[in-house]
């Protein structure tokens, strides 16, 4: 089968499967919709991006976020996924010219998805985790981040007790942007401290 | 600690060979049927028709079958093709549906003007 006929076959196959399961009363399409909705709307880096954007424009909010992260987040009326236990025990740390924070996860199953979205493949790689603790500057350099010697690097190990996330530095060239505009440039990697926030040159 | 079933499912796969493709912190679906297949497999387990681990094992087997016959960087690799195969096998093994009725329905849907 060529590519397009294979895709047509797969699409028909899954449609056939779902329609049979529904006719037999095994599942409803609403159940399936709810599952997909959860992944598309409730769980993703967009929540974290909104939090970061608000912190950039509202210094009082940023202060509260750094002091008591869960209560600051609770004031934001984020979608229901945020109310899950994965969003609790969150602790925000701020990147500044003096301090660069990097989040790792040596035990895992404790990654704060509701805020950061799903982790990139390397995040759970044991080699990455071990090296990030041992030689964070070198690891960051491999990610394309050259942290000056004058900037302190702090590595935070996320756990079931505390789930860390990074408020990255607001990039230059975003003066006057709205929160909504700012939220679009915040990536999961930036909230792990593995990247800086980039402003697309097309804007 | 209480977590949502969907979060439990994600945790079980991340960092393992059966982890789904993702991009910028979100699941990466390249075509409509992939998200449907994803949702159906999770919904069936959520409703108690099988243990999530049973689906994972079926998925791991179908991925291993591909890997046994293809190079690591084969451009035809398709995660959701393996997912679909695992789902089909499991629902048939559990007699939730019959493989022949699935085949018949698929062919009907493929016919033009159906």
Image (cartoon, rainbow, N blue to C red):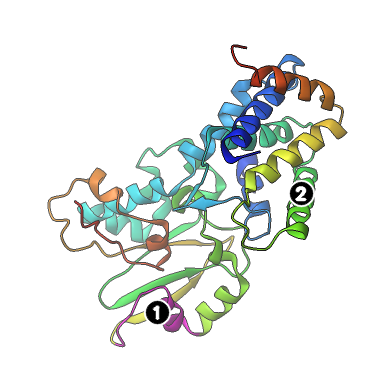
Q: Please state which of residues A98 and A2 is positioned toward the viewer in this rendering.
A: A2
Residue A202 forms part of the magenta stretch: no
Q: Please state which of residues A114 and A64 is positioned toward the viewer in this rendering.
A: A114
Classed neighbour count for the residue bearing mark 1: other residues with Cα under 10 Å, few (<14), some (14–19), many (≥20): few
Q: Residue B59 at x, y = what percent?
A: 74, 47
Element assignment for label 2: helix
Residue A52 to residue A25: above or below: below
Considering the image in quadrants, where does the C terminus of chain B appear? top right
Q: Please state which of residues B96 and A177 is positioned toward the viewer in this rendering.
A: B96
Of all chains, the one bearing label 2 is B
Question: Residue A141 shows which numbered tag?
Answer: 1
Residues in magenta, as a range: A135-149
What residue lies at 70% left-to-right and 45% top-to-bottom? B82
Of all chains, the one bearing label 1 is A
What residue lies at 77% left-to-right and 32% top-to-bottom? B48
Q: Residue A46 at x, y = what percent?
A: 39, 46
């Amino acid at each position: 089968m060529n590519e397009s006929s294979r895709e047509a076959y797969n699409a028909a196959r899954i449609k056939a499967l779902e329609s049979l399961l529904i006719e037999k009363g095994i599942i409803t399409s609403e159940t399936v919709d709810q599952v997909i909705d959860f992944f598309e709307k409730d769980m993703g880096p967009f929540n974290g991006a909104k939090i970061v954007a608000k912190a950039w424009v509202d210094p009082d909010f940023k202060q509260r976020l750094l002091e008591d992260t869960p209560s600051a987040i609770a004031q934001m009326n984020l979608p229901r996924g945020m109310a899950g236990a994965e969003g609790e025990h969150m602790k925000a740390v701020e990147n500044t010219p003096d301090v660069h924070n990097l989040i790792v996860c040596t035990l895992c199953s404790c990654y704060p998805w509701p805020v950061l979205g799903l982790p990139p493949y390397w995040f759970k790689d044991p080699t990455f985790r071990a090296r990030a603790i041992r030689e964070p500057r070198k690891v960051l350099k491999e990610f394309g981040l050259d942290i000056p010697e004058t900037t302190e690097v702090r590595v935070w190990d996320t756990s079931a007790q505390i789930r860390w996330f990074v408020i990255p530095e607001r990039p230059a060239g975003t003066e006057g942007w709205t929160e909504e505009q700012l939220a679009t440039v915040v990536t999961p990697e930036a909230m792990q401290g593995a990247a800086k926030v980039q402003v697309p040159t097309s804007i | 600690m209480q977590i949502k079933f969907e979060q439990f499912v994600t945790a079980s796969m991340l960092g393992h060979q059966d982890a789904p493709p993702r991009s910028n912190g979100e699941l990466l679906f390249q075509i409509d049927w992939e998200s449907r297949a994803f949702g159906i497999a999770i919904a069936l387990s959520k409703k108690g028709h099988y243990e999530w681990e049973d689906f994972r094992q079926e998925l791991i087997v179908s991925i291993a079958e591909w890997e046994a016959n293809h190079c690591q960087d084969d451009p035809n690799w398709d995660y959701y093709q393996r997912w679909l195969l695992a789902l089909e096998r499991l629902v048939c093994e559990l007699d939730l549906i019959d493989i022949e009725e699935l085949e018949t329905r698929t062919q009907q849907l493929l016919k033009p003007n159906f």
